[in-house]
Amino acid sequence: MPAKKTEGKKPDWFSSLCFCTLTEQNNLSLNSISMNQFATPTDEKNWAMFCHLASFSGVIIPFGNVIGPLILWSMKKDYSELVDQEGKKSINFQISMCIYIFVSAILVFIGIGILLLIGLALLNLIFVVIAIVKTLNGEDYQYPLSIKFLN
């Protein structure tokens, strides 16, 4: 079956997918897009959740637990107050955990440091998972043991 020729009609799927429309002269023109807002509140919550989730990159990359949230926060902080707040919370907590782990590593020579390192690793995992769930549910969560470096 031959395809129908649609002259003069603007395809809806194209304009919604690419954020552009075709003019009558077949020139491509961009629609005005508000760059300071997310498409939906769910997108905003997802980016806030990714700030917490990025701390698990520390398993693969040295200091990735700080670098991951820092990159996401710096990319999206100007677009959303929620992402700004949650990113700061995540970064503050991960910097605090790095300090606690450094002190525990020094205390390994005394013998108590190994227990502290295991405890800190478990607390980090538990607190980050709680923060992810609370953020997705729209609840406020303050990390315990967190030092505020960013206000």
Image (tube, rainbow, N blue to C red):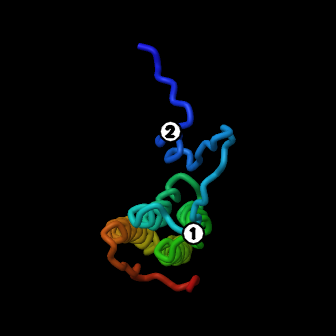
Specify few, some or many for label 2: CA neighbours under 10 Å numbering under 14, 14-19, or 20 or more: few
Amino acid type at mark 2 = Pro
Disc with the residue nearer the chain's start (1 vs 2)? 2
**Res. 109 in view:** no
Between 53 and 135, the one lying in front of the other is 135
Please tell me which residue is depicted at 47% across the width and 42% down the height of the picture: 12
Specify few, some or many for label 1: CA neighbours under 10 Å numbering under 14, 14-19, or 20 or more: few
Q: Which residue is mark 1?
A: 36
Between 4 and 93, the one lying in front of the other is 4
Residue 141 in the image, given as x and y percentages of width and height: 36, 78
Q: Which residue is mark 2?
A: 11
Amino acid type at mark 1 = Asn
Residue 37 in the image, given as x and y percentages of width and height: 52, 67
Please tell me which residue is depicted at 56% across the width and 70% down the height of the picture: 79
Please tell me which residue is depicted at 53% across the width and 85% down the height of the picture: 148
Q: Quadrant of the C terminus?
A: bottom right
Q: 39 left or right of 19?
A: left
Toward the top, the furthest residue is 1
Residue 29, compared with residue 142, is above or below; it is above
Between 73 and 41, the one lying in front of the other is 41
- Please report contact status of discs 1 and 2: CB closer than 8 Å, yes or no: no
